[in-house]
């Protein structure tokens, strides 16, 4: 007789015991965009395989990554990153008509007195989501640098972000995370890109280890060379 047991999945950030899956669309973005969500007033969830699955809570496991992280990494370690995105996301939504017209975002207005730290934290919020998606989707990108960045609160040198208006037309209220599209060479990805969309606002998250890939990175920012002004880009969704 043999007895086997699937070992508990480890936290991909620290190697501790994995407890929870990260929200792929942040619960606060879902709540502020969709308002009240309940069994009686559900939102509809779509995947590539199935459409219109009613979901009655913003905390549903359907919105969460299958890659697990531990309680500490989920709460105290990455909470400042979550909060920074929450603040920027809220600012974008409440000032969208003016921002869309001016095509430029003054980050010191969003984060007065903490601009540099807060834009690093926004970057790290997307580093966390990206890491969860890489593990979840089995994309051949080494996540050890993702984990180090999150643990040491330093930028990931190969991750760039663009924020802007989504060019797609949407008839209903809509939030989405696209699959990762990657360009691989041998057993590893050289370039990967995905989108985080809440209504008309889109975030394009890019990983690139291709030298001289300036064209593909046009309109993106990185916290090490970010000024307090961000250009808003039109993002094809
Ligand atoms: Zn952990």
Image: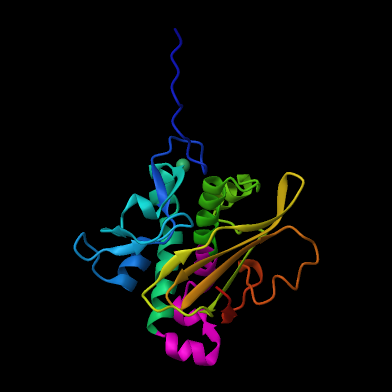
The quadrant the N terminus occupies is top left
Determine if the magenta segment contains residue 221: no
In this figure, which colouring scheme has been used for the structure?
A: rainbow
Q: Percent from the top left, x then y, of residue 128?
A: 51, 54
Tell me what residue is drawn at x 31 percent, y 53 percent: 60
Overall secondary structure of the magenta section: helix
Q: Which residue is at 51% across, 36% downward?
A: 15
**60 w.r.t. 170: above or below:** above
> Where does residue 216 sit, x and y in percent of width and height?
71, 70
At 60% from the left and 59% from the top, the residue drawn is 155
Q: Nearest the camera: 47 or 153?
A: 47
Q: Does 98 appear above or below 178?
A: below
As drawn, 198 above or below 210? below
In the image, residue 101 sits, relative to residue 139, either above or below, namely: below
The residue that appears at 59% across and 47% down in the rendered structure is 148
Magenta region: 95-122
């Amino acid at each position: 007789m043999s007895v086997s047991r699937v070992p508990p999945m480890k936290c991909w950030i620290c190697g501790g015991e994995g407890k929870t899956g990260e929200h792929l669309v942040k619960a606060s973005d879902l709540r502020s965009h969709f308002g009240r969500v309940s069994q009686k007033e559900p939102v509809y969830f779509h995947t590539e395989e199935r459409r219109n699955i009613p979901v009655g809570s913003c905390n549903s496991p359907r919105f969460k990554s299958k890659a697990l992280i531990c309680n500490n990494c989920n709460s105290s370690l990455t909470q400042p990153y979550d909060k920074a995105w929450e603040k920027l996301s809220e600012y974008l939504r409440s000032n969208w008509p003016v921002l869309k017209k001016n095509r430029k975002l003054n980050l010191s207005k969003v984060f007065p007195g903490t601009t540099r730290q807060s834009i690093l934290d926004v970057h790290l919020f997307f580093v966390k989501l990206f890491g969860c998606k890489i593990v979840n989707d089995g994309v051949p990108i080494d996540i050890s640098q993702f984990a180090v960045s999150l643990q040491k609160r330093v930028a990931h040198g190969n991750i760039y972000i663009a924020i802007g208006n989504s060019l797609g037309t949407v008839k209903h209220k809509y939030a989405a995370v696209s699959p990762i599209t990657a360009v691989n060479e041998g057993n590893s990805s050289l370039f990967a890109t995905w989108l985080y969309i809440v209504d008309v606002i889109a975030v394009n998250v890019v990983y690139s280890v291709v030298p001289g890939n300036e064209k593909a990175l046009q309109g993106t920012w990185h916290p090490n060379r970010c000024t307090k002004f961000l250009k808003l880009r039109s993002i094809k969704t």
